[in-house]
Amino acid sequence: MAGVNRNTARLFFHRLRVIIAEEQEKLSPFVDGEVEVDESYFGGRRKGKRGRGAAGKVPVFGLLKRGGKVYTQVIPDAKAATLIPIIKNRIAPDSIVYSDSLPSYNVLDVSDFRHYRINHSRLFADKKNHINGIENFWNQAKRHMRQFNGVPKQNFNLFLKECEFRFNNPSPKKQLQLLKQWIKSRQI
């Protein structure tokens, strides 16, 4: 369609994703107010264990300011030692943090945050106590990445940041405007 070789198109899209990832890190939010936190696992369908502990999946952590932007990060594991520093660096003290019942979030109960958790084995929402916003983002990101029939682990962060960019800027017109601005600022 574009009149270029597929390898040229692949290189072009890779460079765009690198720019998007760099700019998303610069713009990453330090949020306050009501924030949803959650971890997710990306990867193909495999036999055996699902969810936490599934072999070969990429663990990802995200936080979403309600009515605002999302921030994502690839993580080595979903342990408290990994998640809590990210939360403390990205969320202002005295904010309200909503999470699921993962034990890694237990330390939030005695921290500077007001922490509410929802137990998904019993219910998914109790008035304002839910993490449906971040779960919606995970659903959109997985649906978007499914079209690529597998993403190499070394480039996974770039694809994840692209999903973050698309979620934070839902208007295609705004996306194109930002991309043009970022590309222009890099031209020498």
Image (spheres, rainbow, N blue to C red):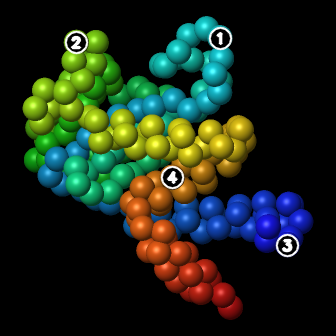
**In this view, 55 is above or below 89:** above
Q: Earlier in the sequence, mark 4 or mark 3?
A: 3
**In this view, 8 is above or below 137:** below
Between the C-alphas of marks 4 and 3, the distance is 26 Å
Q: Which residue is mark 2?
A: 122
- What's under tag 4, amino acid-wise? Cys
Task: Looking at this view, name the residue that lies furthest to the front.
Answer: 1
- What's under tag 1, amino acid-wise? Lys
The residue drawn where x is 31% and y is 52% is: 90
The residue drawn where x is 86% and y is 61% is: 7
Q: Which residue is mark 3?
A: 3
Q: Earlier in the sequence, mark 3 or mark 2?
A: 3
Q: Earlier in the sequence, mark 4 or mark 2?
A: 2
Between the C-alphas of marks 3 and 2, the distance is 53 Å
Between the C-alphas of marks 4 and 2, the distance is 30 Å
Quarter location, residue 42? top right
